[in-house]
Image (cartoon, grey):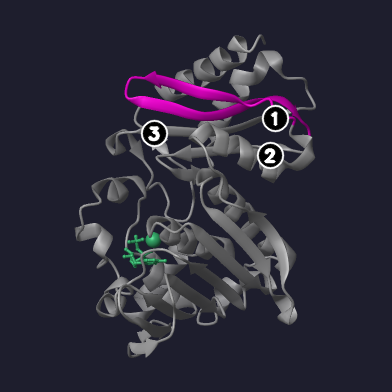
Amino acid sequence: EAAINRIAAGEVVERPASAVKELVENSIDAGATRIEVTIADGGKTLIRVVDDGCGIAADDLPLALSRHATSKIDGTDLLNIHSFGFRGEALPSLGAVGRLTITSRSGAGAATVQVTGGRMGPVTPAALTKGTQVDLADLFFATPARLKFLRTDRAETQAVVDVVRRLAMAEPFVTFVLRDATGGDSRTLFRADGETGDLFDALRGRLRMVLGRDFNDNALPLDAEREGFHLTGAAALPTYSKGAAVAQYLNVNGRPVRDRMLLGALRAAYMDVMSRDRHPVACLFVDCDPTLVDVNVHPAKSEVRFRDPAVVRGLIVSGIRHALAGAGH
Ligand code: ADP
Ligand code: MG
């Protein structure tokens, strides 16, 4: 069974950035308002995620670490099951490919448990004032073949920064801190304090934070609907020239995705107002009934498959054009 778990785990956890994504998504699901991520050596030796969310009760810790047995699935959070794909896989997978320690507090007491190479130790009392701390050390130590496919620490670190930035854009009200603790130092790689106001205010503030001075703050609010798909978010005029990777954020049912069709629609929407060396600046949220989108295309990839891609494309193109036109462009 341990071998099967390791194979399945490789599907979910491709690299440090995918582990960070799973852990931070769990913190978001737990209602955290502050999420601190620490990595060392590109995430290969350490990934630590600390949150102030609802925590896990001591009795539930073993369950949270068992494949397909997690509370969210038999709970009432039906939307989560459909929207966020492969459920109940992340923690068991991480425990199969690294040395995982979870310390959490829910209610009265805190408890901790360790899983190494798929083997779970006893749940013991611990000290923690709030939330959850997950430590994942020595990722892929049990699967050396997978280790060989990792890129340089620098490249893996950059992938982690990218994942955290995308999650931070998807959750503008939450505070995110990402630190690099390689060699015992502590260097801040990314920081975004929780925004306030309505969603558009918050997105604008976060875009300003993420893009820095190159963002000239001309973002326009998006709000459009078509055949069961709802588009919200912020779209700015393409005055930003640094590169598409840091300027375009796509979210489907609340989660960041990187989808070619959606990116194509975004580019098409800007066609008339965009000069060649500029990139669209936008953070889009497409929300729909979970039955209208398949987010399970691949557990580790963030592709999605809409039942009717043409409708979504049309919604994005017309929604953005309408907003830009309203601003006189
Ligand atoms: P899933 O998120 O699909 O339910 P995971 O393996 O990622 O599966 O997590 C298992 C369960 O552990 C979650 O359903 C949740 O109940 C609990 N959990 C994991 N991380 C946290 C966290 N940071 N805070 C509170 N509960 C958590
Ligand atoms: Mg999860």
Q: Tell me if residue 236 can be seen.
A: yes
Relative vertical location of residue 240 with respect to residue 61 in this rendering, above or below: above
Left or right of 187, for residue 119: left
Instruction: Tell me how far mark 3 sits from mark 1, CA to CA.
Output: 25 Å
Magenta region includes residue 231: yes
Disc 3 residue crowd, few under 14, some 14–19, many 20+, Cα 10 Å: many
Q: Earlier in the sequence, mark 2 or mark 3?
A: 2
Place of residue 234 in the rendered image (x, y in percent of width and height, measured from the top left): 57, 29
Q: Position of residue 303 (x, y in %)?
A: 47, 43
What is the quadrant of residue 231 in the picture?
Answer: top left
- What's the residue type where badge 2 is placed? Arg
Task: Report helix, strand or loop for mark 2.
Answer: helix
* Sequence-earlier tag: 2 or 1: 2
What is the quadrant of the C terminus in the image? top right
Q: Which mark is residue 208?
A: 2
Residue positioned 48% across, 39% down in the render? 251
Tag 2 and tag 3, C-beta contact below 8 Å: no
Q: Is residue 152 visible?
A: no
Q: Which residue is mark 1?
A: 217
Q: Earlier in the sequence, mark 3 or mark 1?
A: 1
Q: Residue at x 33, y 90 (%)?
A: 122
Query: Which residue, given by chain and number where applicable, does mark 3 sit on?
Result: 287
Distance from Cα at disc 2 to Cα at disc 1: 7 Å
Q: Is residue 91 left or right of residue 267?
A: left
| Real-space CA distance between mark 2 and mark 3, rounded to the nearest whole angstrom | 24 Å
Element on which disc 3 rests: strand
Range of magenta residues: 216-241
Q: Are marks 3 and 1 in contact (CB under 8 Å)?
A: no
